[in-house]
Amino acid sequence: MTNDRSAALATQRRIAASDIRLPEHILLEGTSGRILREALQLFAERGFYGTSIRDLAVACEIRSATLYSHYPTKENVLAELVRIGHEEHHRRLTEAAAAGPADPASRLRRVVRAHVLAHAEFPMLAVVANNELHALSPELAGPALMLRAAGRQLLIDTINEGIAAGVFDVPDAFLAVTAISGMGMRVANWYDSALPYEPNEVADTYADFALRITKGNS
Amino acid sequence: MTNDRSAALATQRRIAASDIRLPEHILLEGTSGRILREALQLFAERGFYGTSIRDLAVACEIRSATLYSHYPTKENVLAELVRIGHEEHHRRLTEAAAAGPADPASRLRRVVRAHVLAHAEFPMLAVVANNELHALSPELAGPALMLRAAGRQLLIDTINEGIAAGVFDVPDAFLAVTAISGMGMRVANWYDSALPYEPNEVADTYADFALRITKGNS
Amino acid sequence: MTNDRSAALATQRRIAASDIRLPEHILLEGTSGRILREALQLFAERGFYGTSIRDLAVACEIRSATLYSHYPTKENVLAELVRIGHEEHHRRLTEAAAAGPADPASRLRRVVRAHVLAHAEFPMLAVVANNELHALSPELAGPALMLRAAGRQLLIDTINEGIAAGVFDVPDAFLAVTAISGMGMRVANWYDSALPYEPNEVADTYADFALRITKGNS
Amino acid sequence: MTNDRSAALATQRRIAASDIRLPEHILLEGTSGRILREALQLFAERGFYGTSIRDLAVACEIRSATLYSHYPTKENVLAELVRIGHEEHHRRLTEAAAAGPADPASRLRRVVRAHVLAHAEFPMLAVVANNELHALSPELAGPALMLRAAGRQLLIDTINEGIAAGVFDVPDAFLAVTAISGMGMRVANWYDSALPYEPNEVADTYADFALRITKGNS
DNA sequence: GATGAATGAGGCTTCATTCAT
DNA sequence: GATGAATGAAGCCTCATTCAT
């Protein structure tokens, strides 16, 4: 393994990526958008509690009072990012599950690809959505939790179908889900566009891994 | 999948576990130990910046000034936890790598088992060590980063050996490492002793998954 | 004493009345009027410093910037209310003093009636004028202070005349003035149109009380 | 009436007195006491919302953070003053009602004396207790409201007894209570130790006024 | 070893006001 | 007239830390 690749893993930072990316349909014009973008980076790198409203204002080149013309509280900025992240993830997962052959193996491949792709294309968003959810009040966290549960159920169902159909051979469905889901989530932490991998390659390879896990060494 | 198992994944919390556990050789007597234990839980659940010195004092049933009779700063409490976590993890990994047959497959199995076991047995410690490292000054983070790099290199070497020996068939060694390492790290977030799995079972199954990933569907 | 009456006195509120009332000749049309009316209520209930420009805007169903199309500053809104209150009070007092028999007893009766009536008919205005004057700059408070001094002098003169004429028997003129003036001012705090008293009844009875105070139990 | 006396009434200030006085049994030692004393003056003169925590800290010659070593919030400082004021007032009223001949006239004299004396001896405390109660949360205001209701009932009962006994001749008991109570409350606003009256003189004269009001010009 | 009091710095948020549209 | 956005100042309060006791 070359050094530049393994160096991506040897960092004190919570996240390797440095590009601020949000799904294309999210409008980032104006000050509201600027705030969202800078908050995405800061919350991903330092966490919600590690980022002060002043840090955010400095990053946006505005006075901190101006933030409150656009979001009611700091928590609401986080809530917006968490919402966007979960909605994007959920949309990709459900579309992937539906769009293609219905056999469990190819569906699993598509779902894992979508899961990993979301984490590789939007690493900051994924890190914030995954790691900072606990900083939200239960009311603001609720919608995200529901989307998360739905996405997970989709993976569970796909694997259970494969088991039922006899095409999957997995020692424990729950543990397979945690493993496949977990490896994909961690992509957000180490993936960086400076690495010699396109998100698609990572997604393809990880989908392979998921199928190896579920199909066994038969 | 039964509901109680999938429910463990559907939480706003950063960590499912609720037992405060530290390696046995860590002395937890007296107020210093109490502080370390409570900090472990609070830093795991709310993060370093989300936990105030007063939160910690309340949890320890002492006044916050008393903390400074035991640790020079709040950061040093975190540093101690990060140190313990990384040392334990590294010790287990190196011992596992050395203690047994030298063939890549059985070594990989032992290394992954050790990796996963450490995360299942000490979930809070792992979450703190993995997620809060960025809150330390570079000086205090340094030793942990070195142990982490060493542990990762061990996994890299093992896989590369298997590839060289022709017993592993993996599309990309780097991605295999991130996947195997990542699935293990996430165990700290979802594992809970209330689940119907012993840490050993998770470790065994995940080691299976690692071998499936590396050996392919041959 | 019936409960509903004594209940009017047992409140945390600064003022019992809930009707927003201003003298009839004050134009309240348009947004300027709306602002004045809502400010009257808010300043009476929460005080000038306890009411923000945004509270006021919300009450008026406008944006806070719109306020500045109608009044130069928040302080000027208060100044306007204070002016209206003092002018109305002073006008009533001087008219009452002039309009009727010149003998001290009947003049005192008319003056006290006018004093009390103003406080019962415009309780919010009186509370604002009496309690929030200190929030004005000396320049803006000046005119009100002059009217107030004039009104008080009118009462002093009336009582002194009665004493000089031998029809009043009062132990101390100054204390009689403070007592008569003070009981009337407090009417603004407890009077409410829901009470089974018309403002006129209160005014008549308080005027009786004033005469009892000044004429003694002869 | 001499000018210096009437000048006491012609002020923009909410209160004429400038001595910071609290009942003797209230401990004023240390920083907590200092905070209470300075808050008493500031809240009386500028109101609760008109006094910032920094104003208070400057007056106490401490840093504003130090306030929070002594009181949990600014509101609690007010609550303490309101509590002290209402307790002192209530204690004096009930003792006055009990300590002496039971006939309505002499009891009324004692009760009014106590009422007025409390307002003349502790004008700042009375102004704060009377005017700033609305700034407290309902929970913190509750105890004061109960004491206030009890004190008022005592006055009501005394007057009703006198009426029942045929020694009082009052057109309306409720209005007599508001008048007697109100004139006494306003004493806190105008009384100043620089005036040529001792609190006792004011109390005696106001008690005379109360008896004139209730006994009529018979 | 423990603590109450103190503090400088900074936390998030609201303040009254301005101004271009 | 009305408003969305912006802002400097200030709001209340908590932060981690120190120190005398």
Image (cartoon, coloured by chain):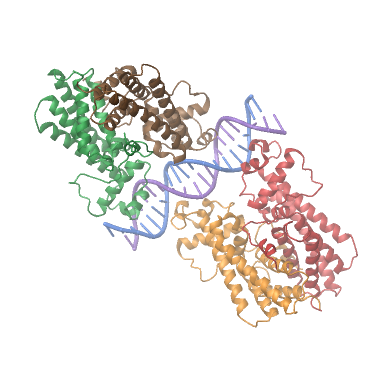
Chain colours: A orange, B red, C green, D brown, E purple, F blue
Q: Residue at x 14, y 25 (%)?
A: C105
Nearer-the-camera pick, B59 or F12: B59
Dividing the picture into quadrants, the one containing residue A81 is bottom right
Q: Residue D180 vs residue D87: left or right?
A: left
Q: Quadrant of the C terminus of chain C?
A: top left
Q: Position of residue D95 (x, y in %)?
A: 41, 21
Q: Residue D40 vs residue A100: left or right?
A: left
Q: Residue at x 44, y 37 (%)?
A: D142
Instruction: Residue B167: tell me if it is visible.
Output: yes
Q: Position of residue B53 (x, y in %)?
A: 63, 42
- Residue reaching furthest left? C101
Q: Position of residue D101 (x, y in %)?
A: 36, 16
**Image position of E13 with respect to D215: above or below:** below
Q: Residue at x 64, y 72 (%)?
A: A154
Dividing the picture into quadrants, the one containing residue D146 is top left
- Residue reaching furthest bottom? A101
Nearer-the-camera pick, C200 or C145: C200
Q: Quadrant of the N terminus of chain C?
A: top left
Q: Position of residue A162 (x, y in %)?
A: 71, 77
**Image position of D119 with respect to A180: above or below:** above
Nearer-the-camera pick, B22 or C199: C199
Nearer-the-camera pick, C66 or D82: D82
